[in-house]
Image (tube, rainbow, N blue to C red):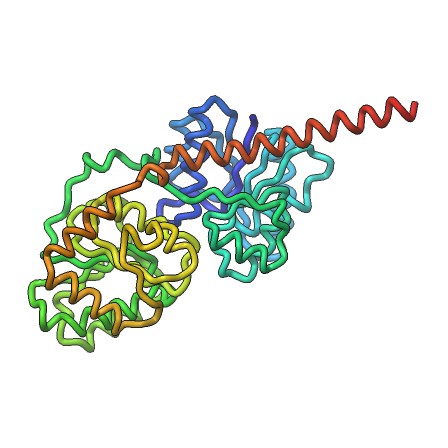
Amino acid sequence: MRVLHITNHVQQIGNGIVNVAVDLACLQTQNGHDVAVASADGQYKTLLRNYGVRHFELDQSRNPLNLIKAAWRYQEIVQEFQPDIVHAHMMTGVVLAGILRNGYKYGLVSTVHNEFQRSAVLMGLADRVIAVSNAVADSMVRRGVSEKKLRVVANGTLGSPRHQSLKDYQPLPLHRPAIATVAGMYHRKGIAELIEAFTKIAADFPQAHLYLVGDGPDRSTFEAMVEKTSFRNRIHFEGFQPEPQRYMLATDIFVLASHCESFGLVLTEAREAGCAIIATDVDGIPETLDNRQAGILIPPKDSQTLAATLAQLLSDPKQLHKWKSRAKQNLERFSAARVNAETLAVYRELIINYDVLKVMKTEDYLINK
């Protein structure tokens, strides 16, 4: 197959959508397919090139003049590459690919990563819509996307071409017990609630430290919040880290306190590293934690319950060890290879349908003649 992935960029900044698209492109090339990525610039261009994936420059910045240029450029790319499948990972890409087919016979696939965004309904323009969790699929149906189009391919990045094996990472010398999150610095990631929860239990556990790994537009707000506490020297803003595994391997309790989360890819990596996990009971997170078997679920926007759960684990070494062990079980289903295989099956389904349609049209033509 000739597969064209469209994403906004290929920057190495911890964007889960970009990471999944890059994984698929590399693995599909390994499987013998002819694969290209259309996007703006980014560090992953080198990795893509090393795997034999072509890269086409496509700036999808949303201003009227640039969108006109992007439409023109997209048609040039399709004319040159002649894809069988166009796989759009973000909203602008699926709109471009859906509107500008102009007779090109490709199947259009979209993946819904952030269904909580209002624009996510536009992903339904595709012939097949991949949902990264059952929760996302249910949400898209409620928003009017046909069940016939939807296919659930649960997310997973373990064994990613972007990373070395977990055993090859050296854990960092963090203060222990270490509590950590790896997340964008956004209010919707529950960073404020995590800081509040830590300040509630910090006096009772004077050896504990909190590590906030990630960057984002709300970071300054959270830093100001920490400056007002008595525990500022035990709350660490680490910024974006290209190798978050080094933090996870040294973490005792990993927290994802998101207000909304389609899947929670980072939880699979925290599980592989053997962290005890506390996460909010929202959207796709329960699926990622095997419905409470691999981590503790708490209500969102509830710093009091989060604090109580942290205290419970920190004060009970046996419970902490139990949840660390349970996190590492049943990880095979989160492999990038499995995601790729199921995605290729969606592509083949579309191509077979197109071939059947061509045969039917030919038969109709011959009968009419």
Q: At 29% across and 70% down in the image, what residue appears?
A: 193
Image spot of residue 295 (x, y percent): 27, 54
Q: Where residue 177 sits: x, y (%)?
A: 11, 58
Number of marks in picture: 0
Left or right: residue 29 versus residue 180 is right
Front position in the image: 96 or 200: 200
Q: Taking the image as drawn, is residue 96 in sight?
A: no
42 on left or right of 182:
right
The answer to whether one can see residue 267 in this image is yes
Residue closest to the far bottom: 228
User: In the rendered image of this protein, does residue 103 appear above or below residue 279?
Assistant: above
- Residue 329 or 119: which is nearer the viewer? 329
Up-down relation of residue 347 to residue 217 (above or below): above
> 192 left or right of 10?
left
Residue 168 is situated, as x and y percent measured from the top left of the image, at 19, 34
Task: Give the residue at x 16% y 61%.
Answer: 313
The quadrant the C terminus occupies is top right
- Based on the displayed image, in which of its 4 quarters is residue 312 positioned? bottom left
Q: Quadrant of residue 219?
A: bottom left
User: Residue at image x 64%, y 28%?
Assistant: 352
Residue 327 vertical placement versus 185 (above, below):
above
Q: Residue furthest right?
A: 369
Along the line of sight, the residue nearer the viewer: 26 or 146: 146
Q: Quadrant of the N terminus?
A: top right
Answer with left or right where residue 34 lies relative to residue 80: left
Q: Position of residue 220 (x, y in %)?
A: 30, 68
Q: Which quadrant would residue 305 be assigned to in this image? A: bottom left
